[in-house]
Amino acid sequence: MSLSNETGNGLQLGPMELKQLWESGGDQLAGLETWRQLPMMYQMALDELQNKIKLIQTEWKHRQGYNPIEHIKTRIKEPASILAKMQRKGLAMTPDNLVGGIHDIAGMRIVCAFVKDIYSLVGHLQTRDDLNILEIKDYIAEPKPNGYQSLHLIVSVPLILMEGPEWIKVEIQLRTLAMDFWASMEHILFYKYDKQVPAHVIKELTEAARAADELDKKMLGLRKEIIALSEGTAGSGK
């Protein structure tokens, strides 16, 4: 992608000026066409990826008899958050740095019933030639110190544009229902405390994460038992 942070007359923009121009849209961005197009391109990449996942769901249900994905949520990072992250990372305010240095502008969360479904889905994604997996961070195998569990992927999704093909990065977070509930509650608590969470609350959160993990394992065990019973009943002709 050939990008620049200069206006039509060659002026360099600071972070706040760029943020105001980006969020204003319209004629003010005439000299920053690439900046204006970026959110649209990331949204198209999310739409493309979501269509792929829906096809996987349909085929999986047809072949396996059940849909392992409970729900999917997508989002585009707000311009203010993107530019703030660029500042934290010490990146100059150029579209090239944004595209190359910020990998979670487009995000998708996929919530599955069981951990085994997460790994099955990732295994399938690794075999596909219509997207590339660039990075895997497995916080299920190795949870964060606070107990956070999830499996993160950075993938690139191809878009066929008028100017030619572009590969756009999307972050995918895969969680079980229990992991997603814990992460949502943790976010609410941290927001309420403005990230100044008392030590005893952090300890309780860590213990709650262990309980969520145990719940996942217990439900998987029950599922296996039910499947075994149903197969036994079918085999006996009852």
Image (cartoon, rainbow, N blue to C red):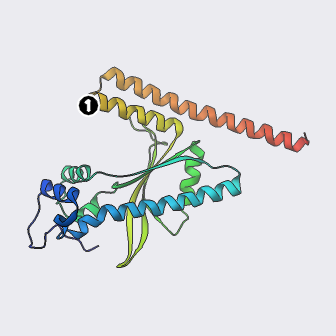
Q: Is residue 133 left or right of residue 195?
A: right
Tell me residue 165's x, y (percent): 39, 75
Q: Secondary structure at mark 1?
A: loop
Tell me residue 31's x, y (percent): 16, 70
| The N terminus - image quarter | bottom left
In the depicted structure, whether residue 238 falls above or below residue 97: above
Which residue is labeled 1 in the image?
194
Regarding residue 57, the answer to whether it shows in the image is yes
Q: Which residue does the image show at 23% across and 70% down from the upper left?
A: 33
Label 1 neighbour load within 10 Å: few <14, some 14-19, many 20+: few
Q: Which residue does the image show at 64% across and 37% down from the upper left?
A: 220
Tell me residue 59's x, y (percent): 64, 59
Task: Locate residue 91: give its quadrant.
Answer: bottom left
Regarding residue 96, the answer to whether it shows in the image is no
Farthest front residue in view: 27
Q: Which residue does the image show at 61% across and 48% down from the upper left?
A: 68
In the depicted structure, whether residue 7 falls above or below residue 57: below
Tell me residue 216's x, y (percent): 57, 35
Q: Is residue 228 left or right of residue 16?
A: right
| The C terminus - image quarter | top right
Foreground pick, 194 / 225: 194
Foreground pick, 110 / 161: 161
Foreground pick, 76 / 235: 76
Q: Is residue 94 left or right of residue 217?
A: left
Farthest bottom residue in view: 163
Q: Amino acid at mark 1?
A: Asp
Farthest right residue in view: 237
Q: Which residue does the image show at 10% across and 65% down from the upper left?
A: 12
Farthest top residue in view: 200
